[in-house]
Image: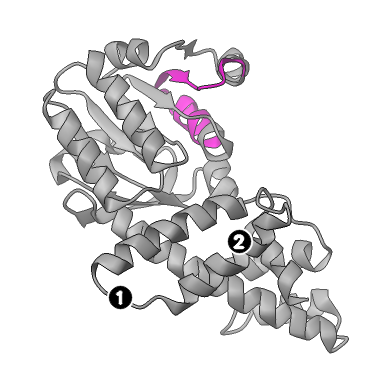
């Protein structure tokens, strides 16, 4: 499928490279044109100056932007020129309600929509090993699979529109818990005077081992917090989780604690650091 990509942040750049390697990418749009031009020069694909221009030229649109308002703004622009039968796949992390709004707007133009947020971080985007959770029409997903598989190691169909985003919310809550546990445990280990690299190695090989410990343990204990996954973005995602939980009267004490911790760090200027910067409060 002739594919256009919107949003060249830390995740989007890696995704776009993998789609190009698989032979699917026609061109990209990015709000900061110079960033798009740099990548298109490298990949030898088109740099669209307007979202409407991209929408009129492709039959599969991939979106990867930061926030709910951004997704809806992009979809409104797409709706002006998109052709019937086009598929739009949003890989941003937003609320289920936003996914449903986007789907409804595009349905008026006979355009199919999938909410397909991803997990795996910058490393996963770069290596094409993301996990993708998808909501929408399964037959539409099957049409888009050849392109989506170029970025992922796992694609899971979750159900109707909004189900992908609800599943991503589960992931983000779990990520908050892992961040709390790993940063607190390593701060405890450091206070005990233990050799930190050995602690990380032995625990990574046991029942408490996890991706975050393996990939962020050494850097955080050395005081390095380069993203990764920006703390301010996880904060945004957890605020979405709080809003969703409120609608179903679901208690989220861990999320509430993490949001408060992140806000302390953001107030101190650490919002653009990796989420492992939570270690700053624990040590």
Between 98 and 153, which is closer to the camera in this rendering?
A: 98
Residue 90: quarter of image: top left
Q: Nearer the viewer, residue 169 or 1?
A: 169
Residue at 35% across, 27% down = 74
Q: Which label was assigned to residue 56?
A: none
Q: How is the image coloured?
A: one colour
Q: Nearer the viewer, residue 115 or 60?
A: 115
The tag earlier along the polypeptide, 1 or 2, is 1
Q: Is residue 112 left or right of residue 233?
A: left
**Residue at the disc numbered 1:** 250
Q: Is residue 255 above or below residue 135?
A: below
Element under label 2?
helix
Q: Is residue 186 left or right of residue 129?
A: right
Q: Name the image quarter holding the C terminus.
A: bottom right
Image location of residue 230, percent across then percent down: 61, 50
Mark 2, other Cα within 10 Å: few <14 / some 14–19 / many ≥20: some
> Residue 116 lies in magenta, yes or no?
no
Residue 263's disc number: 2
Q: Position of 20 compared to 110: left or right?
A: right
Instruction: Work out whether 249 lies above or below 126.
Output: below
Residue sitting at x 61%, y 21%? 35
Instruction: Choose top left, top right, bottom left or bottom right for residue 277.
Output: bottom right
x, y percentage for residue 159?
18, 55
Give the mark toward the camera: 1 or 2. Answer: 2
User: Which residues make up the magenta segment?
Assistant: 14-34
Counting from the top left corner in percent of width and height, residue 166 is at 30, 59
Residue shown at 77%/61% (left/top)?
Answer: 219
Residue at mark 1 to residue at mark 2: CA–CA distance: 22 Å
Q: Where is residue 127 shown, x and y percent of the image?
A: 56, 44
Number of on-image labels = 2
Please, what secondary structure does the residue beneath circle 1 have? loop
């Amino acid at each position: 499928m002739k594919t256009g990509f919107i949003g060249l942040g830390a995740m989007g750049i890696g995704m776009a490279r993998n789609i190009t390697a698989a032979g699917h990418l026609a061109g990209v749009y990015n709000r900061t044109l110079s960033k798009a031009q740099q990548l298109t020069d490298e990949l030898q694909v088109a740099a669209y100056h307007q979202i409407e221009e991209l929408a009129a030229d492709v039959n599969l649109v991939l979106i990867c932007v930061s926030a709910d308002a951004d997704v809806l703004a992009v979809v409104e622009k797409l709706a002006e020129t998109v052709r019937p039968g086009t598929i739009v796949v949003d890989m941003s992390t937003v609320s289920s309600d936003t996914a449903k709004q986007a789907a409804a707007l595009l349905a008026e133009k006979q355009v199919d929509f999938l909410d397909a947020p991803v997990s795996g971080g910058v490393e996963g985007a770069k290596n094409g090993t993301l996990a993708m959770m998808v909501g929408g029409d399964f037959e539409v997903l099957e049409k888009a699979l050849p392109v989506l598989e170029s970025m992922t190691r796992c694609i899971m169909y979750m159900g109707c529109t909004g189900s992908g985003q609800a599943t991503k919310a589960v992931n983000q809550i779990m990520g908050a818990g892992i961040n709390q546990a790993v940063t607190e445990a390593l701060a405890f280990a450091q206070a005990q005077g233990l050799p930190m690299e050995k602690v990380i190695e032995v625990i990574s090989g046991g029942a408490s081992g996890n991706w975050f410990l393996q990939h962020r343990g050494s850097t955080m204990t050395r005081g390095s917090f380069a993203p990764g996954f920006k703390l301010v973005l996880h904060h945004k995602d957890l605020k979405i989780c709080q809003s969703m939980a409120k609608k179903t009267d679901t208690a989220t004490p861990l999320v509430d604690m993490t949001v408060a911790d992140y806000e302390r760090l953001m107030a101190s200027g650490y919002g653009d650091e990796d989420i492992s910067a939570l270690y700053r409060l624990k040590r």
